[in-house]
Image: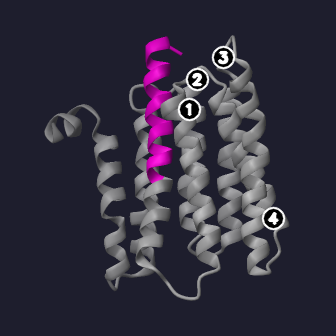
């Protein structure tokens, strides 16, 4: 199965290798540039996976969104704010993509959840930062943007339990970052939770979107 994945989806395979092995850098005395490239490689390869044999239309839009996520992975190593800006741009591009695939009919509960997500998660993030005694406006704005992205993903015609769920896992990763900021020491399990929830959230989104667009021929 591993060889089959490497042959049919080489960029997806390499992305998984980067993602699964990135935490090894926590224990290795490597140059900063090597660590940054290793970290960015995971989502960068997802962008290449989106473009492989489909370098047109909405596949390009998806790749642009993923590229900003990968760029954010690198920038956040230097500055949290600039990293968040790169991620926010990626979310805005994703919102545009999801808006092109609106679901025809939504139940009342689905509409209610779409309204709930952009209210609930920013409030949780604001509450976490308030406990730290830090400025909460910027983080709350960022969480609102990613929450809107998740809400639009949930109401799109992409698979909810892959793309929509992946977007929500992405938000959870960001909330864990806020929790980690308030800790007095570096905790391994927290770092692992942040990284793997972020990556597999993006992984679910990217693969769900690509496979759906391939089936639809868009």
* Colour scheme employed for the rendering of this structure: one colour
Whether tag 2 and tag 4 are in contact, CB under 8 A, the answer is: no
First in sequence: mark 2 or mark 4?
Answer: 2
Q: Judging from the image, what secondary structure is the residue with disc 3 in?
A: loop
Seen in the picture, residue 161 relative to 46 is either above or below; the reply is above
Q: Nearer the viewer, residue 16 or 181?
A: 181
Question: Which numbered dot is residue 138?
Answer: 4
Q: Which residue is mark 3?
A: 103
Q: Judging from the image, what secondary structure is the residue with disc 2 in?
A: helix
181 in the magenta segment? no
| Whole-number angstrom distance, CA of label 2 to CA of label 4 | 33 Å
First in sequence: mark 4 or mark 1?
Answer: 1
Seen in the picture, residue 82 relative to 132 is either above or below; the reply is above
Judge the density around disc 4: few (<14), some (14-19), many (≥20) Cα neighbours within 10 Å.
few
Q: Residue 159 appears at what percent x and percent y?
A: 51, 25
Q: Which residue is mark 2?
A: 57
């Amino acid at each position: 199965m591993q060889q089959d994945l490497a042959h049919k989806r080489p960029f997806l395979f390499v992305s998984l290798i980067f993602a699964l092995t990135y935490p090894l850098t926590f224990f290795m005395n490597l140059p900063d540039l090597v660590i940054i490239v290793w970290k960015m490689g995971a989502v960068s390869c997802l962008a290449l996976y989106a473009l492989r044999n489909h370098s047109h239309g909405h596949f390009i839009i998806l790749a642009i969104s993923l590229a900003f996520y990968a760029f954010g992975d690198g920038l956040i190593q230097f500055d949290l704010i600039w990293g968040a800006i790169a991620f926010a741009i990626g979310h805005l591009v994703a919102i545009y993509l999801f808006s092109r695939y609106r679901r025809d009919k939504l139940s009342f509960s689905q509409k209610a959840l779409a309204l709930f997500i952009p209210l609930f998660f920013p409030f949780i993030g604001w509450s976490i930062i308030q406990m730290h005694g830090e400025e909460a406006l910027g983080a709350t704005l960022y969480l609102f943007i990613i929450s809107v992205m998740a809400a639009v993903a949930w109401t799109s015609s992409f698979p909810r339990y892959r793309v929509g769920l992946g977007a929500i896992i992405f938000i959870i990763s960001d909330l864990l970052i806020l929790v980690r900021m308030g800790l007095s020491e570096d905790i391994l399990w927290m770092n692992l939770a942040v990284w793997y929830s972020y990556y597999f959230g993006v992984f679910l989104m990217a693969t769900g979107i690509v496979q759906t667009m391939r089936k639809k021929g868009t």
